[in-house]
Image: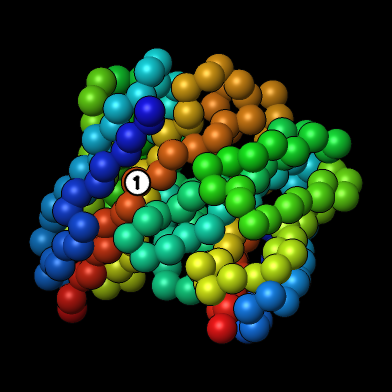
Amino acid sequence: NAGVTQTPKFQVLKTGQSMTLQCAQDMNHNSMYWYRQDPGMGLRLIYYSASEGTTDKGEVPNGYNVSRLNKREFSLRLESAAPSQTSVYFCASSAPGLAVDEQFFGPGTRLTVL
Amino acid sequence: EDQVTQSPEALRLQEGESSSLNCSYTVSGLRGLFWYRQDPGKGPEFLFTLYSAGEEKEKERLKATLTKKESFLHITAPKPEDSATYLCAVPNAGGTSYGKLTFGQGTILTVHP
């Protein structure tokens, strides 16, 4: 099992460009998440999807959109990138049916917006 | 609002020098607490889940404990390969099963040979 995979690993954008970060998991998890990690700020939740067909905003959703394409895939889109979106982005997934679900993380995408 | 505070921000140890990392939390109705390890350039790796005060879990040189206000990650006789950032997280209050997490800012552990 690959676990949680993310593409691309690195990306450089110019202000105003758009891009989509891809995430897939092969653990049959219902729930998926997108986080960003910034120095001094820790991991902050951008969007999450409790199950296929549903998405909800997290702590820092502005400037982002998501799509839960199917049970395996959850993408994050930046429509018009800004330098403030320079960060490391992590996708995570968790299993269904438990009151408290540990989340499993992908390797991250390092995004720089110039 | 749920809050998680980790201390110290950074910890330098000599190989074999045992110590503890602290995670204090403020959350309504704790439903669990997670510890993760993060190596540079990688995603967080799950270590432990603790569910109730008094619970302890061990993995190799690591032991996690939980009280009603905080959790400790004890590192016994650390080795250089234990160097990493250690994160703790708690599920947000709300009773839902999809487990939105609030993370602490982490403790950067460096173990010198």
Image location (x, y in percent) of residue B55: 32, 25
Where is the C terminus of chain A found, in terms of image quarters? Answer: bottom right
- Chain designation of label 1: B
Describe the colour scheme in one phrase.
rainbow
**x 29%, y 32%: residue:** B25
Q: Amino acid at mark 1?
A: Gly
What residue do we see at 43% from left, 27% from top?
A: B32
Which residue ends up furthest to the right in the rendered image? A70
Residue B40 in the image: above or below residue B1: below
Taking the spot 77% from the left edge, 57% from the top edge, the residue there is: A75
Q: From this viewpoint, is residue B103 visible?
A: yes
List x then y, in percent, for residue B57.
35, 35
SS type, badge 1: loop
Q: Is residue A104 left or right of residue A42?
A: right
Quadrant that contains the N terminus of chain A: bottom right
A21 over B70 or under it: above or below: below
The image quadrant that residue B81 belongs to is bottom left
Which one is in front, A39 or A2?
A39
> What residue sits right under mark 1 in the picture?
B104
Q: Locate residue A38: give its quadrant.
A: bottom left
Q: Within 10 angstroms of label 1, few (less than 14), some, or many (20 or more) residues?
A: many
| In the displayed structure image, the side of residue B70 where residue A5 appears, left or right | right
Estimate the x, y position of residue A74 in percent, counting from the top left.
77, 52
Q: Which residue is nearer to you in this view: A27 or B1? A: B1
Please provide percent x and percent y for residue B49. 44, 35
Please report the residue visible at 54 percent of the width from the left and 48 percent of the height from the top.
A60
Using the image as rendered, state which of residue B2 and residue B108 is in the foreground. B2
